[in-house]
Image (cartoon, rainbow, N blue to C red):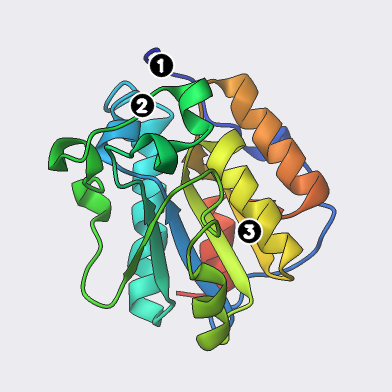
Amino acid sequence: MDKISPYTLPKGSNLPKSAADWIPDRERAALLIHDMQNYFVDFFEANKSPIAPVIENTYRLLHLARKLGIPVFYTAQPGSMTTEQRGLLKSIWGVGMKATEEHKQIISPLAPIAGETVLTKWRYSAFFNSDLRQKLRDLKRDQLIICGVYAHIGCLTTAIEAYSNDIETFFVSDAVADFSEQKHHLALNMAAEICAVVQPTKQVIANLGE
């Protein structure tokens, strides 16, 4: 995969209107930080948009979740998958990351702490071959706030599957990043139209309450 060129995050009037009118609730929500591993983040140009503000905004949501006792989940690919484990991902994305800390580690500003769940990521959706659905039910959480990379692939696929499981989903417009501004807009537009409420970080935080 090629390096990702910097682009400006969409905001304000550039954000799509969501078909749903759900509101994030601290008693119902869980936070999902999707694939923010060194391997994926390193495709972006460090300290530039989109990845720099996405990391900052994701950290703001993570900090608030910890403060409010909102459950936090991460996804992380294991790396060095066998041919059987990799499946059809290999046809499009090749062999993928290696099972080294340099590749696998979740970036340090967002690193999980004790009590937070890291789900092994096998396919686009965080729900695939994981117990995310059951964990949310056990915690009596029926809302999912999604941050991370890449917006139009794993983030969107996860949002669609969450919606399919009657989980109200929030796609944080400036806490996801993608291959390009066009792909980013595509992801936001699709999410807003078919499966999620698209909101910027400041609005999610305001709704959850500090």
Give the Cα distance between marks 2 and 3.
Answer: 31 Å
Tell which residue pokes out farthest to the left in this image.
101
Q: Position of residue 106 (x, y in %)?
A: 26, 48
> Quick check: 118 above or below 78?
below
Q: Position of residue 185 (x, y in %)?
A: 66, 30
Q: Amino acid at mark 3?
A: Phe
Q: Nearer the viewer, residue 156 or 25?
A: 156
Q: Is residue 179 visible?
A: no
Query: Image point 41% across, 16% down: which residue?
Result: 1
* Mark nearer the viewer, 2 or 3: 2
Q: Position of residue 159 (x, y in %)?
A: 64, 53
Whichever of callouts 2 and 3 sits on the residue coming sooner in the sequence is 2
Whichever of callouts 2 and 1 sits on the residue coming sooner in the sequence is 1
Judging by the rendered image, the residue that carries numbered circle 3 is: 170
Judging by the rendered image, the residue that carries numbered circle 2 is: 95
Q: Nearer the viewer, residue 127 or 29?
A: 127
Q: SS of the residue at dot 3?
A: strand
Q: Is residue 53 visible?
A: yes
Judging by the rendered image, the residue that carries numbered circle 1 is: 1
Whichever of callouts 3 and 1 sits on the residue coming sooner in the sequence is 1
